[in-house]
Image (cartoon, helix red, strand yellow):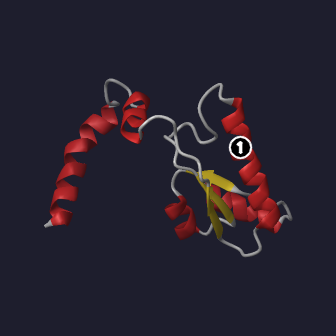
Amino acid sequence: MNVPVLARAFEAAGISTVLVTMMPYWAEKTGTPRTLGVEFPFGQTLGQPHDVAQQQRVIAATLDLLATATEPGTIAHLDEQWPIEQKTAYKAWQPSEPSPIIAHLAPRIRDIMRQSRQ
């Protein structure tokens, strides 16, 4: 089950939800009830490991959105910058070797992207 469907099921049962995501654009397209967009690297949605203060700020912003959102589909953006440049953080997150499926699909994806630019 995908997250927006699950969120809507919880909401229908009377349980309020907030999605914290690095991709608020997709949350808007899929109809998540409330979304907090964070500009963090994938896999670190609530903040850097062991940075309790940062994680608490994200959770506090999430709870604040839950308490203040008045419209369905509300999207808020966390005003906190990742302390490491995004490009560097992204590279640190990536494995040194691509998975077999990524190695297989990467040339096809590049071709599709090249064709879409033409």
Which residue is rendered at x = 61% and y = 69% of the image? 31
Measured from the top left, where is residue 100 in percent x and y? 31, 31
Residue 1 visible, this angle: no
Q: Quick check: can you spot residue 60?
A: yes
Residue indicated by mark 1:
57
Residue 7 or residue 36, whichever sits in front:
36
User: Which residue sits furthest bottom?
Assistant: 71
Name the kind of residue labelled 1 in the image: Arg
Please, is residue 103 above or below residue 95 in the view? below
Quarter assignment of residue 106: top left
Residue visible at 36% across and 39% down? 87
**Which residue: 50% across, 41% down?**
42
At which x and y percent is residue 67? 82, 62
Number of numbered discs on residues: 1
Q: Residue furthest right?
A: 14
**Looking at the image, which is closer to me, 116 or 23?**
23
Q: Which quadrant of the view contains residue 94?
A: top left
Q: Is residue 47 left or right of residue 112?
A: right
Where residue 90 appears, as percent x and y from the top left, is: 40, 36
- The answer to which image quadrant residue 114 occupies is bottom left
Q: Left or right: where does residue 32 sit relative to residue 112?
A: right
Asked if 81 appears above or below 10 in the picture, the reply is above
Q: Which element is circle 1 on? A: helix
Q: Residue furthest left?
A: 118
